[in-house]
Structures are given as structure tokens and as C-alpha cells.
Amino acid sequence: MTMIHDLIPIDFRTIGSIFSSLRSRNYRLYFTGQGISLIGTWMQNIALSWLIYRITGSVFLLGLIGFTSQIPTFILAPFSGVLTDRFNRLRIMIITQVCFMIQAGIMAFLVLFNLIDVWHIIVLSIVFGIISAFDAPARQSLVIDLIDKPENLGNAIALNSAIFNAARLVGPAVAGIIIAVVGEGICFSLNALSFIAVLAALLQIKITRKQVPPKTTNFKKSFFEGFHYTFQSMPIRTLILMLATLSLVGLPFIVLLPAYAKDILLGGSDTLGFLMSALGAGALTGALYMATRKTVLGLSKIIAVNTILLGLAIVLASFSDKLCFSLIIFFFGGLSMVLFLSSVNTMLQSITDEDKRGRVMSFYAMALMGTSPIGNLLAGTIASGIGISHTFLIGGTVTVLIGIWFAINRKSMRKDVHNIYINKGILPRYPDDLL
């Protein structure tokens, strides 16, 4: 009991403040629209992965599609981050949502009329990745502009994660049933329609806070200024590199879940939906806990502990061939994954200067979404050679080692982070060991 309380120390007095950022009208609109749209997005994700594995039976192609849908972020995110700092972030998001809706509509048409082929999926996945490369930095940077009180940033980021994972809880389960009854095409259609909600919300948002433009107007200078700022800061550099490494070797287990559901658990699309919903339930729990936190202190400890726990969950999944046991494992995997990701996101946004936030968050998107395609391709290749279980075992073991490395090196970054908090006026002077 003591160990659980140490990992997630629940203070019931904070439950009432769990939705504090929703008091901001703009964020409330954004939150509502995203909640509807993300359910459709997760339905499409499940339908796409199941469609690929159904028509090809190839775990390599699962990894390849994961690669093609995210590699554009790796290439374009640093440049799109410059645009995010130079131009209106809200307008960029509106444009990307329209593009996402068109992409989903084309996919729905091809599947419903039985015209879909593997090359269509690859091309549309690349298009999705290009859109995401511009959407992710704008989305991450926009959050602070939507809240009335800057101290609610951590809560808003946590609620973003909560709504994302609530959708992951609902969307895959619904998609699994729909696919089993009427096929994948309806999932793509519902996703296209779901973007109407987020567009309606974004068009009603009015931001009065003026976005701080970068000091230089030269695109090349602006890019290198953001690059140097990101990688000369030891805390930012450490978090970005750790996230990139974890996305390369740890998180790609998700892309193999269709094959895991079918070949290891001997299930169908409903089994895949249940696994994704278990991940979503754990992630939602973690996100709600993060929303109850009122301070940025202690985030580095959460990162270290939950990286190790995520690795252990992946290792345990490699030994499971029972659905019930796997559901429990993936619940805790989702819990630790979101505690890690939310903590990294909150720390980065808290210690980053406003005029460089778009560029720093573009490197965050590059680390999270840009290296994972390489990891997806690598995982698919390894799984096709040595099997899914052994691939899980390797990825989980390396993830545990990453967590141990960060725990050992955490002390070296605490002083820098603490000084940044003081200089930005976030905190008065606290003992270093509270970070």
C-alpha cells in the first residue's frame, strides 16, 4: 500500500480542482471539440491497423505503415515549429483539421467502395504524416494561449491527455465491434464526420493574448536559434533525447498489437479493441491523476519511475497468452506511459521561453512522433524475424534500462530546472530535492 501511495499519492482535497482549466472559455471549447474528434481518430487508427493486417497478414507492413504515417514529422517538425512561432497557431490548427477530414474522407470512400489497395494506404499515411507535422507543434503550443491563468498549464496538459485517452478507451472498443459487424469503412466515415466538432469549436475561439513573435525574422536564423536553444539547455536536451529513445525502442509495441491480438491471443478485431481500451483506461487514470497536481515539483521522479514501470509492463506482455492477464498488463502500461508523457510535456512547456515554445515543441513532436516511425519499422522487421513476444521482451528490457539511466542522471538536471523555475517566477526558492 505504501509503495502504491508513493507512486501515485492521491490527495482527495485536490479532486475538486481536477477541471480547473475548463473555467477558461477557449480551453473549454477546445476540450469539447477534441473529445468528439479524438474518438473518431482512434476508431480510424484501429480500423487502419486491422485493415492492413487483414488484407496482408504482414507484421512488417504494420511497421511500415506506422513508419510512413510518422516519418514526415521527423523530417518536417523542426521547420513547422518555426512557422508555429511566426504565424497564428489557431489558424494553423484550423487548416490542419480540414486536411485531416479530407484525408479520412478519401480513405472512407476507397474502403466503402472496395477500391482500397496497399499503395493507397501508404500514400494516405504519408499525407497524414505531413499534416501531423504541422498540426503537432501548433497544437502543443496553442494550449497555453487557451487558458486564462498560466498556472493552469499543467492541468490543461493533463486534461488534454485525459481526453485523448478517454477517446482511446471508447474509440477502439466501438471500432472493434463496428469492424466485426459492418467492416472498416464506417470507422473512416465516422472519423471524417467527427472533425466537424473540432472545427466548430476552433472557429469560436477568440484569443486576446498576443503571440510573441521570434526576435529574428529570418527563417534560417529562427530555425537555428530554436535548435541551439533546445539542445544547449541541459534539461530540455535530456528530456527530448530520452523521449526520442523511448519512442524508438519502447512505444512501438503499440503498432504490433493487431498481430499480438490475432497470433498470440488468438482473437479478432474485438480483442484488439479491448487491448487498446485497456491501454486507454490506464492512460485515462494517469491523466486524471496528473490533472490533480497543483505543482510542477516532483515531475522528474514521476518520469524515472514510470519509464521503468512501462518497460516492465511490456516485458510481462511478452510472456502472456491470456486475454485477462494482458488486459491488466496493458492497463498499467497505459497508466505509466501517460504519467511519463504528461510529465515530460509539462516540464518542457514550463521551462521554455514563450517566443521559442513552438520550436521546442516541434522537437518534442519530432522526438515523440518522429523517431517512432523508425521504431515501428524496426519493430515490424524484428517481429517478422524472431516473433512478436521476443520483440516485446527486447523493447521492454531496453525501456527499463532507459528509466534506470534517467533515475541515475536525474540529480544533475534538478538544479538547472529549479533555477529556471525561479527565474520564470513559477516558484520561490525551494530545496533542490523537491524537484
Image: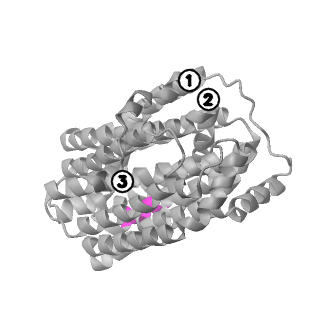
The colour scheme used here is one colour
Q: Nearer the viewer, mark 1 or mark 3?
A: 3
> Residue 75 is drawn in which quadrant?
bottom right
Distance, label 2 to label 3, CA atoms, is 28 Å
Residue under the point 38% across and 39% down: 288
Residue under the point 47% across and 38% down: 160
Question: Is 66 part of what is drawn in magenta?
Answer: yes
Residue under the point 19% across and 51% down: 271
Under circle 3, the secondary element is helix
Question: Magenta span covers which residues?
Answer: 61-67
Residue highlighted by disc 1: 24
State if disc 2 and disc 1 touch (CB < 8 Å): yes
| Nearer-N-terminus badge (1/2) | 1
Distance, label 1 to label 3, CA atoms, is 30 Å
Residue highlighted by disc 3: 7
| Nearer-N-terminus badge (1/3) | 3
Under circle 2, the secondary element is loop
Residue 220 in view here: yes
| Nearer-N-terminus badge (2/3) | 3
Distance, label 1 to label 2, CA atoms, is 8 Å
In this rendered view, identify the residue nearer to me: 374 or 23.
23
Residue highlighted by disc 2: 149
In this rendered view, identify the residue nearer to me: 395 or 40.
395
Q: Amino acid at mark 2?
A: Lys
Residue 93 in view here: no
Q: Position of residue 52 (x, y in %)?
A: 33, 57
